[in-house]
Amino acid sequence: MENSIFVQMGGTYRQEGDYFLPNLTIPESVSVGVWGQRHLQYIREYRKALYFGLQLSGKLNSYLADIDRQAVDMFSQLVKQMSGQEGITEQLKEDNPMGWVQRMNNIQVAAVEIVNKEIIYT
């Protein structure tokens, strides 16, 4: 009897009663955040060849996790740099909390736009 493709590729079986069941494992799950989910939606809709290539090779989750890490790092750096340039300090937070929130929200919106343009939608 010829070996199946599964056995030829290194797969193994275990016996359960009268049946032989393949020893299958689930690939390690990688956490994908909001940035990775946005990029997934983008490549699924507009870059189908990339999406299917990554999915077929089994590298989609690790690719999205990497994109997510890059986006989080870039967002954090941008918010830090922009708040420093705008002179937003802890003293401002104590003196004028609502003004501080307004300015930080503006900075975060600008940082999100930059990350989307540079990483997510490319």
Image (cartoon, rainbow, N blue to C red):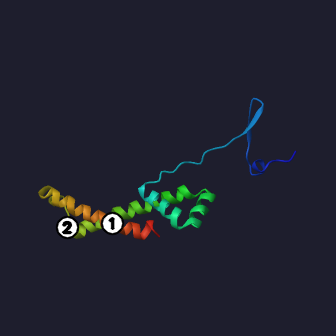
Above or below for 82 versus 68: below
Looking at the image, which residue sits at the far top? Answer: 17
Would you identify the image quadrant in which residue 117 lies? bottom left
Q: Which label was assigned to residue 27? A: none
Which dot, 2 or 1, sits closer to the camera? 1
Sooner in the amino-acid sequence: mark 2 or mark 1: 2
Looking at the image, which residue sits at the far left? Answer: 95
Looking at the image, which residue sits at the far front? Answer: 45
- For label 2, the residue is 87
Q: Is residue 16 left or right of 120 when viewed as pictured?
A: right
Q: Is residue 51 left or right of 14 when viewed as pictured?
A: left
* Residue name at image x 76 percent, y 34 percent: 19
User: What's under tag 2, amino acid-wise?
Assistant: Gly
The answer to which of 103 and 40 lies nearer the viewer is 40
- The x and y percentages for residue 99 are 16, 61
Disc 2, SS: loop
* Residue name at image x 34 percent, y 61 percent: 76
Disc 1, SS: helix
Q: Is residue 52 left or right of 94 when viewed as pictured?
A: right
Looking at the image, which residue sits at the far right? Answer: 1
- For label 1, the residue is 111
